[in-house]
Image: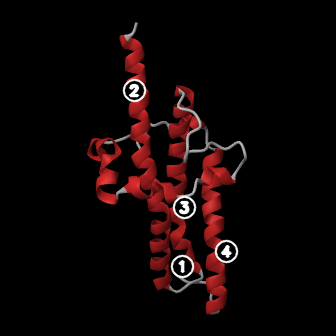
Amino acid sequence: MQIIFLTNSWTILLCFIVWPLLQVSAAFICLKLPERTFSSQSLLFRTYDFENGGRLYDRIFRVSKWKHLLPDGGMIWSKKAFRKKKLDSFSNENLTKFLIESGRAELTHWLAILPFWVFGFFAPARVIWYMLAYALIVNLPCIITQRYNRPRVQKLLYNRKNQRMDHH
């Protein structure tokens, strides 16, 4: 329900100011959460059977063809940030860190979608639907990419663990 009435120009300007603030806030919140929050075994981040080890996302969305085009948002926060786009090391420690950061990225993008309704306070009701569409278009590719990559890394770690056990 619109409670603040502005000119179209001010409304548009406010939209361009509010979205980045909301998205940065979501990222900041997720950066402050402890790593255990992003366990790949938790309800939100686990891989489900219907996802077929992440292959569902490649079959439906062809994620492997375009995922390289997405920015690595983790690099915005710190020079020491974890790079998910191109792994520097395939050590078990680095792959485990990838799983955590993948969960962090996924939650950040889910949280970035949720506040689309805020625009209803200062924009006409129909604008809320545009904001939802924008939020989905911007965030779903990132969520899909995390859902695609995480099971692949989990499988690699699982196979390594089994190989070590076979050798002992």
Per the image, label 4 sits on a secondary structure element best described as helix
The label shown at residue 17 is 4
Above-or-below relation of 110 to 120: above
The amino acid type of the residue labelled 1 equals: Gly
Q: Residue at x 50, y 38 (%)?
A: 99
Q: Residue at x 71, y 42 (%)?
A: 80
**Distance from label 4 to label 1 (Cα)?**
15 Å
Amino acid type at mark 3 = Ala
Classify residue 136 as left or right of residue 76: left
Q: Earlier in the sequence, mark 3 or mark 4?
A: 4
Say few, some or many: other residues with alpha carbon within 10 Å of mark 3 (under 14 / 14 to 19 / 20 or more). many
Q: CA distance from mark 3 to mark 4?
A: 14 Å
Please indicate, yes or no, whether residue 6 appears anywhere in the rendered image.
no
Write down the residue under mark 1: 120
Q: Nearer the viewer, mark 3 or mark 2?
A: 2
Q: Residues within 10 Å of mark 4 (few under 14, many from 20)?
A: few
Please, is residue 124 above or below residue 105 in the view?
below
Left or right: residue 44 versus residue 21 is left
**Structural distance between the alpha carbons of marks 2 and 1:** 47 Å
Q: Is 36 drawn above or below residue 55 in the view shown?
A: above
Q: Position of residue 76 (x, y in %)?
A: 68, 54
Q: Amino acid at mark 4?
A: Ile
| Residue named by callout 3 | 112
Report whether 77 appears left or right of 168: right
Point out the tag, 1 or 3, that comes first from the N-terminus. Answer: 3
- In the image, farthest residue toward the top: 168
Q: CA distance from mark 4 to mark 2?
A: 44 Å
